[in-house]
Image (cartoon, grey):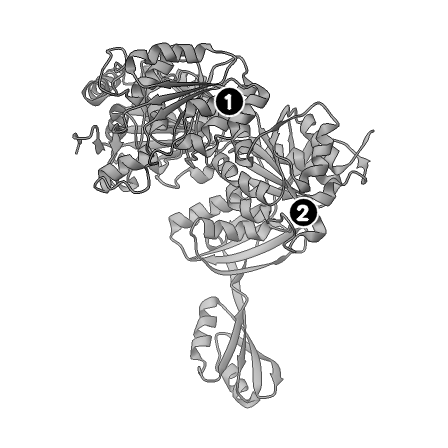
């Protein structure tokens, strides 16, 4: 049995967890660990340019692959820089293990150089955290951290490692545990058969059902089962922002994303429904509008792996707490197609079709060469969709471009749409695209961003050069913080407080070139599609495509604050209420 | 109002996870007491929470999700005994203190210290009884009070038992 130090045991434990990539940034408290990394070749360390990006990259990797993303940072500023990334993963339930160096045990609490209370500062945004108290416990803690991160409702786990715990001179026998005991953590219990029966009975009797699927279906790998259920009932399906791809957008039963900027037909369907089946979605405030006025005529079934999410916002008639795939299979076994009111559901689908025809999204903007002086951001997404055949991994930042991508790129597969839905973290797009590209080097990986967001982690262009990551960056450049501007237009009388850059934007083409990448600028709709094809076809180059889009464009539909799900603005001049 | 018993790992940071949950999610704690149990690896925490029933149900769920929390019991749902202990310091004579104790029913009082011009009395009762007793004291002589918070335990077979350890293999 080879002896290990705490530092080498930590890296060996990661290798035993089949970790191939560790995103991080070195520093004093983590140096023993970095020396251990140098002396092995199983775990590859990826040096980013800022710790926030390390966490987002691991996060993107985790979202695209379903595996646990792994991060290593140093103490103090390394740890605090990681916080935004950890909070992002926490809000979207992404499995991560974040290892932070810490000052030596005897210095903790003395305000030592680069000391920060990582356990304290990360507590509200982690699923769990560990402070290593003896080097010998490292293998077991790593094992526990991975189990906690990926089981149940996934989430980030922090392991804080004081420097003396990784002392290369303190050696011990290493053994990676095959199993571990945790009396305070257990898998969710089985759903009672009676709950399944109640759910089936509601589904069989519904005349206006909606399947409302979220990120839990993607995390729970239950897309196939969702598809079977939708086909049996012929039920309309809407996906949340986090759930895009859980149900294929090109399927006839798909009615688009719901919520704040959801489609008119999806929000109307939620409002008029008589049965909402929430699957791995959590009635987030962006999808319910005012909970007091939320879909009052609908019975509700809620399937979620987190019992804390059930009846947190909306009371439900049937709760199904547990694994989505398993529960859906139980339902599929019980449900009898003969009992479904096919005629009523046919009428219901027609009603939804009518809504779509009234105020649905215009998917012809590009094909009909809808010309105005400036390129519309929606046209850019449509062009991207065409050039990538709808098959790319799309990451995004936060703002108008995110919503346009969510509305107009039709995701047919789970794990292809990677965005910060819960926390809404600007700066997420580029580093998460790096994580995806590491996992899928042969696939198209595109970061849809804006000139505001991209500048929050732009330093990662350097990381992309170092590791040869030919991601594509589509920058919807509207010369302003667009989503804030939209709100200021709508609610603050067009008083543009702090959203303009006053000619201080960089020349993104030159900027990309200075990092050794390809830069492009597109201002004319007539050259958009050709340049997009050119951009996507450069398989071994990072291309930064700076597209000037109409700065006056707003994202619609938009739910009216405080209203119900049918109260929307559908354009600058039209309201439904 | 709900009276909640929690069994949790006796580990550094465990208490802050539980207490942090309350501030993080905007729940109010009325009283809190915590100490190790007969199993030294576990701490028992008893708290009184003044929130509506729907909020209490969320609190119980969220508490159960905290990894260091082993078991949660809503004492308000079971038959239980509960009591609170308070120590008060009064600037009175021992004679006066004895008179206060004689009239203290339903709380049970006892003089536990007498030094210089000050007397310390320990009283035991339900939290409302202790409230009433404290209100009955003359404000001018009443110098200090410390309260244990409401303690409680289910009667008979209403145990707060830790589940057997879950072995996870994968």
Residue A239 visible to the viewer? no
The chain under label 1 reads: A
Q: Nearer the viewer, residue A451 or A208?
A: A451
Q: Quadrant of residue A266?
A: top left
Instruction: Kindly report which numbered mark, 1 or 2, lies closer to the viewer in this rendering.
Output: 2
Say the numbered circle drawn on residue A308: none
* Residue appearing at x 50%, y 27% in the figure: A432
Q: Can marks 1 and 2 be said to lie on one chain?
A: yes
Residue under pointer 2: A103
From the viewer's perspective, tell me whether residue A448 is left or right of residue B82: left
Instruction: Point out the image quarter for the N terminus of chain A.
Output: top right
Residue B58 visible to the viewer? yes
Q: Is residue A97 above or below residue A233?
A: below
Label 2 environment density (alpha carbons within 10 Å; few <14, some 14–19, many ≥20): many
Say the numbered circle drawn on residue A64: 1
Mark 1 or mark 2: whose residue is earlier in sequence: 1
């Amino acid at each position: 049995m080879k002896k290990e130090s705490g530092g080498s045991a930590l890296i060996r434990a990661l290798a035993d967890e089949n970790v191939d990539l560790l995103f991080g940034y070195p520093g004093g408290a983590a140096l023993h660990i970095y020396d251990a990394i140098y002396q092995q070749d199983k775990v590859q360390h990826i040096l980013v340019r800022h710790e926030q990006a390390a966490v987002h990259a691991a996060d993107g990797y985790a979202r695209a692959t379903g595996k646990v993303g792994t991060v290593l940072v140093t103490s103090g500023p390394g740890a605090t820089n990681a916080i935004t990334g950890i909070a992002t993963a926490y809000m979207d339930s992404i499995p991560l293990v974040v290892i932070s160096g810490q000052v030596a045990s005897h210095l903790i609490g003395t305000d030592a150089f680069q000391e920060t209370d990582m356990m304290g500062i990360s507590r509200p945004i982690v699923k769990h955290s560990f402070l290593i108290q003896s080097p010998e416990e490292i293998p077991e803690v790593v094992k526990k951290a991975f189990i906690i991160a990926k089981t149940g409702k996934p989430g980030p786990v922090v392991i804080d490692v004081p420097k003396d715990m990784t002392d290369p001179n303190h050696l011990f026998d290493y053994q990676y545990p095959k199993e571990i005991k945790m009396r305070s953590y257990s898998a969710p219990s089985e759903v009672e058969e009676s709950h399944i029966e109640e759910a089936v009975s509601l589904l069989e009797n519904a005349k206006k059902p909606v399947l409302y699927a979220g990120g839990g279906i993607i995390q729970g790998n239950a897309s196939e089962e969702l598809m079977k259920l939708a086909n049996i009932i012929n039920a309309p399906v809407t996906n949340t922002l986090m759930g895009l791809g859980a149900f294929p957008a090109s399927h006839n039963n798909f009615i688009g994303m719901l919520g704040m900027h959801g489609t008119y037909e999806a929000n109307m369907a939620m409002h008029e429904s008589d049965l909402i089946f929430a699957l791995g979605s959590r009635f987030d405030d962006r999808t319910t509008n005012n909970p007091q006025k939320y879909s009052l005529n609908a019975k509700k079934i809620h399937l979620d792996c987190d019992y804390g999410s059930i009846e947190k916002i909306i009371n439900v008639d049937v709760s199904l707490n547990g694994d989505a795939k398993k529960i859906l299979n139980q339902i599929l076994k019980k449900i009898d197609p003969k009992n479904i009111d096919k005629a009523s559901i046919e009428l219901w689908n027609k009603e939804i079709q009518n809504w779509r025809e009234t105020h649905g999204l215009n998917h012809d903007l590009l094909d009909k060469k809808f010309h105005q002086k400036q390129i519309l951001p929606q046209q850019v997404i449509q062009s991207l969709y065409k050039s990538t055949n709808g098959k790319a991994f799309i990451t995004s930042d936060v703002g108008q471009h995110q919503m346009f991508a969510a509305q107009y790129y039709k995701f047919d597969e789970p794990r292809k749409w990677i965005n910060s839905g819960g926390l809404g973290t600007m700066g997420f797009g580029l580093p998460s695209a790096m994580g995806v590209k590491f996992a899928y080097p042969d696939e198209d990986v595109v970061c849809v961003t804006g000139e505001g967001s991209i500048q929050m982690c732009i330093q990662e262009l350097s990381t992309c050069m170092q590791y040869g990551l030919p991601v594509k960056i589509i920058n919807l450049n509207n010369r302003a913080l667009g989503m804030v501007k939209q709100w200021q237009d709508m609610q603050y009388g067009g008083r543009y407080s702090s959203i303009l850059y006053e000619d201080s934007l960089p020349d993104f083409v030159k900027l990309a070139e200075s990092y050794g990448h390809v830069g492009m600028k597109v201002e004319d709709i007539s050259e958009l599609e050709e340049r997009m094809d050119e951009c996507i076809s450069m398989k071994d180059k990072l291309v930064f495509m700076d597209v000037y889009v109409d700065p006056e464009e707003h994202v619609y539909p938009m739910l009216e604050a405080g209203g119900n799900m049918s109260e929307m603005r559908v354009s600058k001049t039209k309201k439904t209420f | 109002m709900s009276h909640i018993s929690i069994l949790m790992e006796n580990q550094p940071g465990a208490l802050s996870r539980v207490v942090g949950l309350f501030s993080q999610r905007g729940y109010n704690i009325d009283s809190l007491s915590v100490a190790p149990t007969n199993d030294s690896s576990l701490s028992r925490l008893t708290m009184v929470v003044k929130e509506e029933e729907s909020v209490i149900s969320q609190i119980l769920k969220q508490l159960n999700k905290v990894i260091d929390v082993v078991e949660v019991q809503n004492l308000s749902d079971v038959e239980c005994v509960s009591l609170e202990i308070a120590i008060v310091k009064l600037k009175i004579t021992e004679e006066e203190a004895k008179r206060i104790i004689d009239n203290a029913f339903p709380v049970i009082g006892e003089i536990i210290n007498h030094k210089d011009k000050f007397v310390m009395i320990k009283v035991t009762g339900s939290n409302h009884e202790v409230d009433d007793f404290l209100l009955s004291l003359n404000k001018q002589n009443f110098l200090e009070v410390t309260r244990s918070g409401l303690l409680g335990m289910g009667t008979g077979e209403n145990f707060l038992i830790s589940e057997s350890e879950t072995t996870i293999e994968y």
